[in-house]
């Protein structure tokens, strides 16, 4: 005879299975929709050779105005774009419209050459009103941002979250801009944000006229103790003063510029009230300790966590608004 409690367990299992099946059907439907959109996008590229839509009357004037500014990435400048298909995928209609808006605002004059590429974005060297800028263009034709939802949900700054891919991209870009602004306000070493529109973020460029500064993981630091102390203070100020945590603090997301570390890729940074903020903080400090140990320092997690949480930062004040 099956006891009552066992029936409850079986019913519970059945309920979970039905929920799982419904969820799988929903995911399958979403994926089918994404696959359909992707096929239509690829078909349109094939039919128009990728950029034929630029000749359409409603876009022609816009593209004519910004074409010279894009010459570097169109393959007409000194830094030729190696794959036209990549250009077609990165510079879709909405992206070009965003660039048009930023050019009209004066944040960008030209895009000169690519300096980095990743799953979420391509970064270009650009020229703005006051000199070189980095232009980060987030992809709009893939679903990678759905894996980053944990960094957006729970952030009170971005309520009413929509799950459509394009909405997630726009939210993520605004989030990175606001995070950079917040960290810069406290005098932290991050690229200064300049402008944002839809999926395009403009910020300070870190590098020489021909190449970006290297990442911390790719350089041999002569005095790792000084760098470690600076990065521990970065995490402490971020937590205690800016009330945030980076969330992906590693040598891959720290550049070595003018003989000091500059932290980048802060899109995933969350505020203290985020339900996973403490978990992310422990992970960030752990990665810094691991870097220190690899560079010959005797650092441990317990002491590093104490420094981040209890460091005297009475001398740190926010910058005045410019």
Image (cartoon, rainbow, N blue to C red):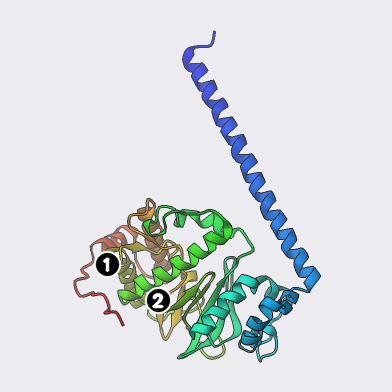
Residue 209, position in %: x, y? 53, 91
Determine the image quadrant of residue 143: bottom right
Q: Are marks 1 and 2 in contact (CB under 8 Å)?
A: no
- For the residue pair 66 and 210, the one nearer the viewer reads as 66
Indicate which disc residue 241 carries: 1
Residue in the picture at 72% in, 55% down: 36
Indicate which disc residue 10 carries: none
Side (left or right) of 258 relative to 164:
left
In which quadrant is the N terminus drawn? top right
Residue 172 in view in this figure: yes
Residue 306, position in %: x, y? 26, 60
In which quadrant is the C terminus drawn? bottom left
Secondary structure beneath dot 1 equals loop
Residue in the picture at 68% in, 70% down: 89
Structural distance between the alpha carbons of marks 1 and 2: 15 Å
Q: Which residue is mark 2?
A: 190
Q: Is residue 206 above or below residue 297?
A: below
Residue 250 in view in this figure: no
């Amino acid at each position: 005879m099956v006891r009552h409690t066992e029936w409850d367990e079986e019913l519970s299992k059945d309920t979970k299975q039905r929920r799982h099946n419904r969820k799988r059907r929903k995911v399958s439907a979403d994926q089918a929709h994404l696959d359909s959109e992707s096929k239509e996008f690829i078909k349109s590229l094939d039919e128009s050779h990728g950029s034929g839509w630029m000749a359409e009357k409603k876009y022609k004037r816009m593209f004519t105005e910004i074409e010279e500014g894009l010459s570097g990435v169109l393959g007409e400048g000194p830094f030729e774009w190696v794959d036209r298909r990549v250009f077609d995928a990165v510079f879709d209609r909405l992206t070009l419209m965003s660039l048009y808006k930023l050019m009209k605002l004066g944040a960008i004059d030209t895009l000169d050459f690519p300096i980095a590429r990743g799953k979420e974005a391509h970064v270009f060297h650009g020229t703005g009103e006051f000199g070189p800028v980095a232009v980060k263009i987030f992809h709009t034709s893939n679903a990678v941002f759905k894996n980053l939802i944990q960094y957006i949900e729970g952030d009170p700054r971005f309520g009413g979250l929509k799950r459509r891919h394009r909405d997630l991209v726009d939210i993520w870009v605004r989030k990175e801009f606001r995070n950079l602004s917040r960290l810069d306000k406290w005098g932290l070493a991050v690229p200064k944000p300049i402008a944002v529109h839809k999926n395009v973020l403009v910020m300070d460029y870190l590098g020489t006229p021909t190449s970006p500064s290297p990442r911390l993981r790719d350089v041999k630091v002569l005095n790792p103790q000084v760098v470690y102390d600076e990065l521990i203070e970065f995490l402490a100020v971020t937590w205690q003063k800016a009330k945030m945590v980076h969330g992906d603090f590693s040598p891959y997301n720290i550049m070595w510029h003018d003989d000091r570390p500059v932290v980048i890729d802060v899109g995933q940074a969350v505020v203290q009230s985020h339900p996973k903020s403490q978990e992310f903080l422990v992970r960030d400090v752990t990665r810094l300790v691991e870097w220190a140990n690899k560079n010959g320092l005797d650092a441990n997690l317990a002491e590093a966590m104490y420094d981040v949480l209890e460091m005297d930062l009475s001398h740190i004040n926010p910058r005045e608004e410019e």
